[in-house]
Amino acid sequence: MKKLIKKILKLQISYYIVLYMYLYRIKKIRLNVWLPNPIKLKYLDLFFKLDSNFSKLADLHFFGINCLDESFSISVLRKLAYKSDVIFDIGANIGLITLILSDSNPNAQIYSFEPSSYSFPILVDNINLNKFKNINSLKLGIGSNDSKQLFYTSSVNHVISSFTPREGFIEEQIEVKTLKSFCDDLNIEKIDLIKIDVEGYESDVIAGLGEKIFNSKPIIFAEVLNETCGEKIIPFLPKKYIYFRVFEEKKVLVEDKKINRTSKKSNNYLFVHLDKLSILKELSLI
């Protein structure tokens, strides 16, 4: 019976039946169902084409980005992107956030960084499928120093690839650069917005900004997995930076005195220099 069900799920018609009957709520079904390539993902008022040669795309597609319950975070990023000329997406994975940032501001110059040999080709495919012309995709790790480092990734779960060894993960050596040296190499004078999601290594990314953080005063949107990760970030932020917890439940930004974890639904923080607070006010974010 199980073999028969799997055969049925591999038929092209199964995808539309699963959607229509809400059978995607059953994980075993949505991870085995046939997917058209590319598929179309709708998020808020946005439609994207996505390469379905990605083992976990069934989850992202059927539940949408809402499965992460970060719709408010996405709306904050979209508004900030609209007011930004140069945007860095660090830890881009397969590029969902990169695509959203590009759609929000087609005139911005976007640099999308992803070091994983599994995720990077999908990132490039997704950018090409949507015909975005303002995105520079780079197979590169961003950290606190220029080096070659071991990176651990999985063909099953790309989302939690990182510099931390994990059982069953594949080891590869990647190039790592600081944001300062990257900007110096390309003569990038300023950075307006940085989104960081690097599984606990956010402090290394910020540390690598060097004097760029003082000169550009970029708005930084970063995942903070726990209080320990938050404490590591603080020494690398100038004193005039304000910490805003992204409160998904109430859809507000809440100013905090320290960085820990946002809520049960989200781990995101927004770091804003005092000189840039007017942007948040203009966008009605505070």
Image (cartoon, rainbow, N blue to C red):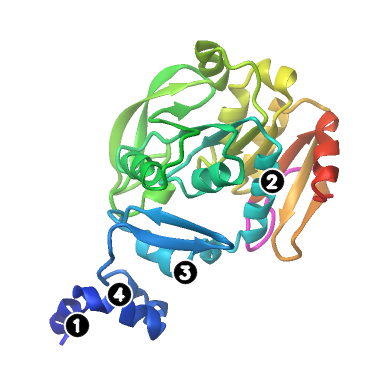
Q: Nearer the viewer, mark 3 or mark 4?
A: 4
Disc 2 residue crowd, few under 14, some 14–19, many 20+, Cα 10 Å: many
Q: Nearer the viewer, mark 4 or mark 1?
A: 4
Image quadrant for the N terminus? bottom left
Instruction: Residue type at mark 3: give it.
Output: Phe
Position of residue 95 measured from the top left corner of the image (x, y, whole percent): 45, 45
- Calculate the distance from the C-alpha at mark 1 to the C-alpha at mark 2: 44 Å
Position of residue 281 measured from the top left corner of the image (x, y, whole percent): 85, 44
Residue 57: quarter of image: bottom left
Q: Residue drawn 52% across and 66% down?
A: 67
Position of residue 184 measured from the top left corner of the image (x, y, whole percent): 55, 12
Residue 15 badge:
4
Instruction: Residue type at mark 2: give it.
Output: Tyr
Disc 1 residue crowd, few under 14, some 14–19, many 20+, Cα 10 Å: few
Residue 5 badge:
1
Element type where label 3 sits in the image = helix
Residue 269 badge:
2
Magenta stretch bounds: 258-267
On screen, residue 173 versus residue 275, left or right, reads: left
